[in-house]
Amino acid sequence: MTTTLTLTRDQTINPIAHISLPTGASGNTSFDSKGTELDEIHPILDIYSKALSLSRRLRNSEDVDEINGLLMEATFWENKLESLKQDINHFNVNVNSNSKAYFEFFRLVGKLLFNQLIQQNQSSATKTRLLVSQITSILPQILNQPVTSSSSSSTSSTTTTTTTANNISKCLLIYPLFITGIDIIGQQNRLEFQSQFEKLLLEINSNSMTTILVILNEIWKLNPNGCNFVDWVNSSSQFFFAIN
């Protein structure tokens, strides 16, 4: 069963598809993501955008050949996500295990995104439950420890870069956490997940992003036991957010 989520204007958020990691921070602080784990997830964020684009094109297409072509393209990007798993073993030797977990978190959520948008699998589906289990198993490591720059230098400029990278890395967790939350099933599991989400929102001190929790709870209401597929992405042209 497919359920469409209808949002009011004040429940919409800006498009995630335009997310990008900055090469320079605002104000007097300069930040270059090269050499940090933020640089490593660029390819994954690009694939997120591909999934969103393919979903919209599939939704609007009625041509069989075009649909088959789009599905083949989706398979290509899903395989790309799978191949990126090997990249974890080729990280800079200075990148710690938490950074590797950060990369793997984004990669697995990318697979979940295709599972939602292209395959349109229910939350209770075996593949979905397996992906969610893999993602949530590494969440404590992601949320409880700051992601740091791979540089080991203790200079002032490096400290500033590390702080900026940490702030950005925390903000970037919001969208993949939202994607994960969509497929969390079970009242207790949802309460625990919401608690983790609220803790992160408090840490980054962003009131606007609390809108995501409102939307997530609406999705859960439409899908109480995970047996429905909630068409969340196509319900609003602004059902995403950007890092401001």
Image (spheres, helix red, strand yellow):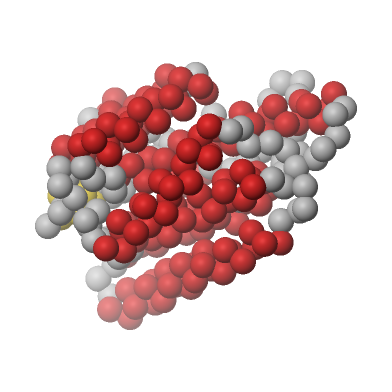
Give the position of the N terminus as an image quadrant. Answer: bottom left
Q: Is residue 224 above or below residue 133?
A: above
Image x and y of residue 43, in percent: 60, 56
Q: Is residue 57 above or below residue 235?
A: below
Q: Does residue 2 appear anywhere in the picture?
A: yes
**Of 79 and 131, which appears nearest the observer?**
131
Image x and y of residue 70, in percent: 39, 71
> Horizontal placement of 78 versus 28: left or right?
left
Q: Residue at x 82, y 38 (%)?
A: 152
Q: Quadrant of residue 124?
A: bottom left
Q: How many marks?
A: 0
Q: Residue furthest bottom?
A: 65
Q: Is residue 221 above or below residue 101?
A: above
Q: Does residue 15 appear anywhere in the picture?
A: no
Q: Residue at x 72, y 47 (%)?
A: 95
Q: Quadrant of residue 181?
A: top left
**Of 57 and 117, which appears nearest the observer?**
117
> Horizontal placement of 154 versus 50: left or right?
right
Give the position of the C terminus as an image quadrant. Answer: top right
Q: Residue at x 77, y 21 (%)?
A: 28
Q: Is residue 119 above or below residue 166?
A: below
Image x and y of residue 172, in percent: 53, 38
Image x and y of residue 49, in percent: 48, 53
Q: Residue at x 37, y 52 (%)?
A: 133
> Horizontal placement of 235 versus 157: left or right?
left
